[in-house]
Image (tube, rainbow, N blue to C red):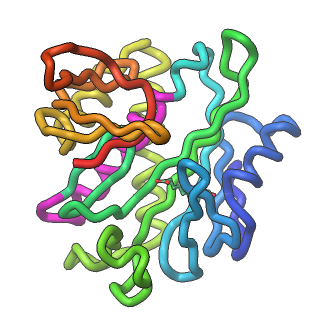
């Protein structure tokens, strides 16, 4: 009942952020066919042409501290993977924290944004961008080696409505389990099962800094546990990695 559908919008995250400020309730969803200013992580843009993908944002208001936002991100990538698994035979994986890949090319990105009081979340805007119908030539020089779409990797027919419903159902299931039981075990099991990061040698990229490490595990709060070449263990809260 709280689903808003737009043909064109600047960004579903921006729109939902406005609605949240005006008191929209938890579970409100904004979906658009096309975004003129689709945003990715780290200030990047997210290609959002009409007919190419699913662009949607979901409003969550968990009664949790602001650190929970990282868990919500992992929860969302687990939910999307559970759905994509039904379409894609092999090569599906999650790169920490939340890039969903098929054979090492990105098919889905997640952008979680939050407003909070000092120790409590006010609202989390969970934005999901899924490349669905893009053909190889749609990606252009910049993305053609790093991006892919669902239709390039499935022989199943794809219905927009069905995909959206499946993703929202899976999200709801994992989210309610998380907030009601207070345990991230269920979605972390799924996350670990799809992880292409754990056990790998990686490069951690934090601003201008780049360093090598081995990814050992992901903690329940979403931090990545790594070991540096000199044998020291530490956690990485945010940043980007290359594998
Ligand atoms: C990433 O950089 O991996 C995250 C991409 C997130 C894109 C989605 S599309 C729907 C929502 N609205 C936006 O402007 N961005 C997110």
- Compared with residue 100, is residue 48 higher up or lower down, i.e. above or below? below
* Residue 76 drawn at (x, y percent): 43, 41
Could you tell whether 34 is left or right of 106 in the image?
A: right
Residue, x 47% and y 28% (percent of image)?
Answer: 70
* Residue 98 drawn at (x, y percent): 39, 44
Look at the image and give the residue range highlighted in magenta. Answer: 70-91
Asked whether residue 81 is drawn in magenta, I would say yes
Could you tell whether 27 is left or right of 111 in the image?
A: right
Residue, x 72% and y 69% (percent of image)?
Answer: 6
Q: Quadrant of residue 118?
A: top right
Q: Quadrant of residue 35?
A: bottom right
Asked whether residue 44 is drawn in magenta, I would say no
Please identify the dominant SS of the magenta region. Answer: helix
Considering every residue shown, the one lying at the far bottom of the view is 137
Residue, x 32% and y 39% (percent of image)?
Answer: 96
* Residue 30 drawn at (x, y percent): 67, 56
Between 71 and 180, the residue placed more toward the observer is: 71
């Amino acid at each position: 009942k709280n689903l808003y559908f737009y043909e064109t919008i600047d960004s579903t995250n921006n729109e939902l952020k406005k609605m949240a400020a005006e008191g929209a309730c938890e579970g409100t969803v904004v979906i658009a066919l096309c975004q003129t200013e689709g945003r990715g992580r780290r200030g990047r843009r997210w290609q959002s042409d009409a007919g190419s993908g699913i662009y949607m944002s979901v409003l969550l208001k968990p009664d949790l501290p602001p650190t929970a936002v990282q868990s919500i991100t992992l929860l969302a990538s687990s939910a999307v993977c559970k759905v994509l698994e039904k379409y894609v035979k092999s090569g599906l994986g999650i790169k920490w924290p939340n890039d969903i890949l098929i054979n090492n090319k990105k098919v889905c990105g997640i952008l979680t944004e939050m407003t909070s009081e000092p120790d409590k979340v006010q609202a989390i805007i969970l934005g999901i961008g899924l490349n669905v119908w893009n053909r190889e030539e749609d990606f252009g020089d910049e993305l053609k080696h790093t991006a892919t779409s669902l239709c390039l990797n499935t022989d199943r027919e794809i219905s927009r409505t069905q995909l959206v419903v499946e993703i929202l159902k899976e999200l709801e299931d994992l989210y309610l389990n998380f907030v009601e039981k207070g345990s991230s075990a269920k979605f972390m099991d799924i996350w670990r099962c799809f992880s292409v990061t754990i056990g790998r040698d990686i490069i951690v990229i934090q601003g201008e800094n780049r360093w090598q490490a081995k990814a050992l595990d992901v903690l329940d709060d979403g931090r990545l546990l790594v070991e540096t070449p000199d044998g020291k263990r530490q956690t990485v809260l945010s940043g980007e990695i290359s594998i």
